[in-house]
């Protein structure tokens, strides 16, 4: 009996010590005390709205040092436009610190999204999209492939003074590239890089032989490609079909 009383007394003593600590840590006690009165933002960002960032964090900071829910605050910041990642911490005695990594747009993706330099897609609605971005399209699972072909095709066309503006991978795995002069290059599914390299190698010679503008190139041929040309003087005129053999 004495042993049982000692055990009960010991448990009560532990509870009396532990409960206040648990209460403080969970915000049951002191939720209105030790307010977080200072906001510290770190990280290099240009497009994240500082006022909106502060407005988002104030409701969480008002709960106090021990009651603030950092996970909820962090999730709220991560939903703001241009925010790629966010990390929220508290610093004793009154600082709420947020570290923001901003999306760096690399390309447009589809009709309403952007692709960041880190390969992440994010919505384009409600933000000012930087001009001059290339246009990509394709399934999300093909992001790495699209970026790789864009970089490789740019390297191929640059020496002949042409720029790549669009890259599209359709659901069947077929590639289409758009050049800066408006020409469309249909590459197809198989041996895309080999076909592009052969086309670029012959293109300067083909351009010197034509007093016209290249409108479309279809590379889906085993031993050549089909070219469509538009006259300089009449851009709206019907194009002509010619064959270029490798």
Image (cartoon, rainbow, N blue to C red):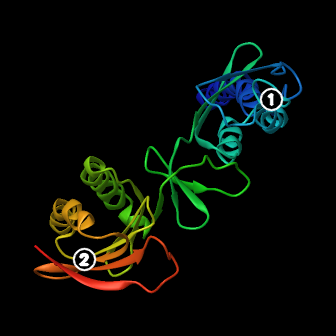
Which residue in the protein does label 2 denote? Answer: 189
Nearer the observer, 229 or 97: 229
> Image check: 81 left or right of 244?
right
Secondary structure state at the residue bearing disc 2: loop
For disc 1, the neighbor class at 10 Å (few under 14, some 14 to 19, many from 20) is many
Nearer the observer, 79 or 107: 107
Q: Position of residue 244 (x, y in %)?
A: 18, 77
Q: Position of residue 176 (x, y in %)?
A: 36, 72
For disc 2, the neighbor class at 10 Å (few under 14, some 14 to 19, many from 20) is some
> Image check: 221 left or right of 50?
left
Quarter where residue 186 is shown: bottom left
Q: Is residue 20 above or below residue 143?
A: above
Distance Cα–Cα, label 1 vs label 2: 54 Å
Residue found 82% across the figure and 26% down from its top: 64
Residue found 29% across the figure and 70% down from its top: 210
Residue located farthest toward the top when viewing the structure as drawn: 93
Quarter where residue 180 is shown: bottom left
Which residue in the protein does label 1 denote? Answer: 61
Quadrant housing the C terminus: bottom left
Nearer the observer, 4 or 237: 237
Q: Position of residue 161 (x, y in %)?
A: 33, 50
């Amino acid at each position: 009996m004495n042993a049982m009383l000692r055990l009960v007394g010991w448990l009560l003593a532990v509870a009396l010590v532990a409960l206040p600590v648990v209460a403080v840590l969970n915000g049951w006690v002191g939720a209105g005390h030790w307010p977080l009165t200072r906001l510290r933002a770190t990280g290099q960002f240009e497009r994240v709205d500082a006022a909106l960032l502060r407005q988002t964090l104030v409701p969480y900071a008002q709960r106090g040092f021990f009651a603030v829910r950092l996970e909820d605050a962090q999730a709220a910041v991560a939903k703001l436009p241009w925010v790629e990642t966010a990390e929220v911490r508290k610093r004793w005695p009154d600082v709420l610190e947020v570290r923001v990594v901003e999306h760096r747009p690399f390309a447009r993706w589809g009709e309403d999204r952007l692709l960041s330099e880190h390969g992440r897609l994010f919505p384009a609605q409600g933000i000012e999209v930087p001009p001059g971005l290339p246009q990509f399209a394709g399934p999300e699972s093909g992001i790495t492939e699209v970026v790789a072909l864009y970089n490789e095709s740019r390297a191929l066309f640059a020496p002949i003074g042409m720029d790549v503006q669009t890259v599209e991978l359709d659901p069947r795995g077929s590639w289409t590239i758009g050049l800066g002069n408006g020409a469309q290059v249909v590459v197809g599914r198989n041996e895309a890089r080999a076909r592009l390299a052969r086309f670029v190698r012959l293109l300067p010679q083909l351009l010197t032989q034509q007093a016209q503008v290249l409108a479309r190139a279809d590379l889906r041929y085993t031993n050549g490609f089909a070219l469509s040309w538009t006259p300089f003087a009449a851009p709206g005129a019907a194009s002509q079909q010619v064959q270029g053999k490798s």
